[in-house]
Image: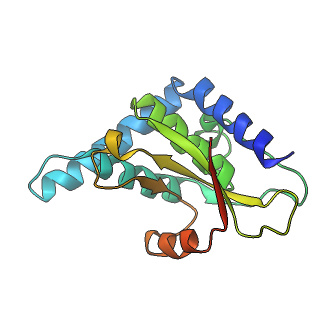
Amino acid sequence: MSTAATIASMGRLAHADQAHPSVIEFAADVDQRAQRAANSAGRPATTVDRLDALERAIRERVAYVPDPVEHELIRYPSVLLTAEPQGDCDDMITLAKAVTLAWGLHSKLMRLGFRTDRRDPYSHVVLWVSAEDAGAPGDVVLDPTVAPEQLAALLAGVQVADLT
């Protein structure tokens, strides 16, 4: 499956599952975590706090397991939360997209390419959330597959990116 087809499938699955009870419950739990953390710091939670909590919750809940070579699997977010809590970047970002949809945030799937010498240079996906919706001074990029301190280095190595 091409990355364009993969991204399209991810979007469809996220939209289909945004109101699934397991996704709504997960989104509420993440929201409560963000609220507690912000309250302990003596301030109300921001959308950026919620997004940070979402990234951490996915990292904690879903084990990273790559797809078999040459076989792209994309799981429904509800399956990832219940029956099969393991997946790769596509699965984790599809879950993040479903949660941001449930929260009413505007987000886009962003394909990243690290080698332009291939017919299809894209090999990774992250979730972009607009600064306007997130109340941040810049756009927010979520990637639960890497540690937050490694995200800047990952993005610095990108040769081509595409928002869909």
Expressed as whole percent of the image width and height from the top left, the position of residue 12 reads: 67, 29
Q: Quadrant of the C terminus?
A: top right
Expressed as whole percent of the image width and height from the top left, the position of residue 135 reads: 27, 45
**Residue 24 versus residue 94 in the image, above or below:** above
Please indicate whether residue 122 sits to the left or right of residue 130 in the image: right
| Residue at (53, 76) in percent of width and height | 153
Please indicate whether residue 60 sits to the left or right of residue 120 in the image: left
| Residue at (66, 31) in percent of width and height | 13
User: Which coloring applies here?
Assistant: rainbow
| Residue at (61, 42) in percent of width and height | 94
Q: Residue 117's image quarter?
A: bottom right
Expressed as whole percent of the image width and height from the top left, the position of residue 147 reads: 49, 70
Q: Quadrant of the N terminus?
A: top right
Q: How many numbered marks does the figure carry?
A: 0
| Residue at (64, 57) in percent of width and height | 161
Residue 85 visible to an observer of this rendering: no
Front residue of 86/44: it is 44
- The outermost residue toward the left is 42
Q: Residue 138's image quarter?
A: bottom left
Front residue of 63/2: it is 2
Front residue of 29/161: it is 161
Expressed as whole percent of the image width and height from the top left, the position of residue 132 reads: 33, 41
**Residue 152 versus residue 140 in the image, above or below:** below
**Residue 157 versus residue 51 in the image, above or below:** below
- The outermost residue toward the right is 70
Q: Residue 115's image quarter?
A: bottom right
Residue 142 visible to an observer of this rendering: yes
